[in-house]
Image (spheres, coloured by chain):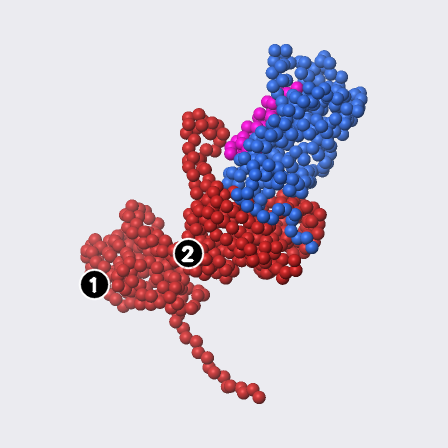
Chain colours: A blue, B red
Amino acid sequence: MKVQPALPVIYDSTRRGSAVFEELREALNYHHLIWQLVRRDILARYKRSFLGVAWTMLNPLGMMLVWTIAFSQFFKSASLPSYPAYVLSGLLAWTFFSQTTTASMVNLIWGGGLLNRIYIPRVSFALAAQGTGMVNLSLSLVPLIVVMLLTGLPIHLSFIFIPVSVLVLCAFALGVGLLISTWAVYFPDISEMYQIILVAWMFLTPIMYPETVLPADYRVYITMLNPMYHMVKLFRIPTYYGRFPTWVEFLVPFMIALVTLVLGWVVFARKSDEFAYRI
Amino acid sequence: MQDSSSSSFQGQTIIQLENVSVEYRVPQEQIGTFKEYIIRLLEGKVKHRTFKALNDVSFNVNQGEVFGLIGQNGAGKSTLLKLVARVLRPTRGRVRVMGHVAPLLEVGAGFHPELTGRENVYLNGAMLGFSRDEMEEKIPRIIEFSELADFIDAPIRTYSSGMSARLGFALATDSQPDILIVDEILSVGDEAFQHKSYERIQSIKAQGASILLVSHSMSVIETNCQRAAWIHHGQLIALGDAKAVVAQYSGSVLENESERLSIQMNTVEGKLALTNNKSPYRWGNRKIEITHVHITDLAGKDQTIFNTGQSLRLHIDYEAHECISAPVFGVAIHRQDGIHITGPNTAQAGLTLPMIDGAGRIYYEIASLPLLEGLYSFSIAVVNKNENEIFDYHDRLYSFRIVNQENHTKERYGILTLNGRWELEVPQIIELK
């Protein structure tokens, strides 16, 4: 009878490599935990609601409806074949980002009591947040397809590129999530502040408006310097635009995501030893 | 490996601490918000000081041993447990732990209220490193042990605190850990379940696990542990045989308290003077004033800690501000929890005091204290002949402690020993054929 978990059994505080790789190795050791945390998030979220998982699909649809009613008249002239599908595709990518980064932070603070009592890799919460986000995003692809078909947009083969777009987005969100979680451990008001930043950031990202409506003078700042512009676009290209991205369209967001992820991971892993007496 | 013990570390040192120090950098002032921090940072005013939670601590725990940790709150015991649970890393020194550590502290801390008991077991199992498949196999045993079969599929928010504690305990102890961390002895559920959990711990121990036990109860440490360590302000004060360490610790605690009680005595006067008429512990018209009280042994040496059976003398200095005829002095003894034990006075003792004026002193002497272990206090009062006018009343201002270190009596239940005597009337001896 196997009674003990299949984890390394000898622990020596002096024998360890860099915190950065240690955290990665432990995250792999604890993949069961990360999966259970995803399960918990999804189950807990829908446990008490009547429509259950349907909300994952209804939520972005509702949001899209609001935006469409509010703004479609403004942007009609712009060359957008299906405004609802345009908004929805952008909204899905944005929602993924804002939900997973917020959840990384909130879950780490929530799990603080646990981190004080039992060893679990501290990145578990941020990784689980990405997992939950991916499940939610996959589910909300259903309403996107429905809206595209209803508004006369064809579904192209380029849909198979979605997983790549999502992975890039996910790497970026994980990097940002880890950075803000680290700060939030030290300064609790970061989590409040971040909600405001998110709203501002969303309006500065072409989600419900096409980038062409921006005055040419500012357009370059809002598009080129805003990483989320590239992330949202990488998601929109295979869905709304129905084509594969060019190398530049892929490599720019990919590099941004990679750098952010490495930076976030290093900062988080280095500081994570202090978390146990900070939270 | 077919051994009577299931531990893979037979006879080894299982926890090893070598010159371990833990330091926290804490801001000198509490900086709560980011804005404040930025302002301070720009002003160059963020100052940190180092707080040593543990300072150069070394000891080993062997396989199969029950090891006790004692010390006051904040001494560093929890920090030590965190090191062993690998939640915290030492700033200096080395911590080596061989085997799986199962923490048994505030079990159920990771339960999610919306999920069912079963889902929570899977989640918490994963935190201990078990996959879902491994948990499938354990779950029937966990449900059975926790006695929650009827509730396991209900959300945790519907559980009582006792129920979730039971589930947490069953979960944490189902795997046979190499090291079990027990922070304060279990007070889980009802008496029957407590008994069951105690047995569970015994069986984990019997299978060769080491147990790290933290408790404020010295008797728990004495009866359960072979060895113990006493930690004070982050430093290892004593290490060795549990009984010896406990004795050393208790001795020091008494010493500190004696100091505290005598300080209290010395400041009472000042306190009384300050709070003159308004003190809730003093009243009366002060025609006769009790100016000073102290507790000594028969030789007149100040003492605040007594053994059962010892003698005690109470010195009461007074000053009569006018001529008073036949006043009555009295004392009362209360136990800390408010039980009034006795209240003798001079009139009841048949002593009629003369007319008094000016300063004087009166003694009250107890030849052999019948009180059992505990904290007690004296009240002192002086009233008129008819006991209907209070001149001065000091309510429970003078504390003393009774300990039982000299074995004057072996009695330990209740408040006092009556020096009663047992006698057996020998029955007819029945010869067995």
At which x and y percent is residue B306? Answer: 35, 62
At which x and y percent is residue A75? Answer: 70, 15
Parent chain of label 1: B
Locate the N terminus of chain A by quadrant. Answer: bottom right
Q: Residue at x 43, y 41 (%)?
A: B51
How crowded pointer 2 is (Cα within 10 Å; few <14, some 14-19, many 20+) is rated as many
Q: Quadrant of residue A205?
A: top right
**What amino acid does circle 2 point to?**
Tyr
Q: Are marks 2 and 1 in contact (CB under 8 Å)?
A: no
Magenta segment's dominant SS is helix
Q: Which residues are magenta?
A: A181-206
> Residue B249 got which mark?
2
Tags 2 and 1 on a common chain: yes
Nearest to the observer: residue A95 or residue A28: A28
Q: Residue at x 54, y 35 (%)?
A: A270
The residues bearing labels 2 and 1 have C-alpha atoms spaced at a distance of 50 Å
Residue wearing tag 1? B354
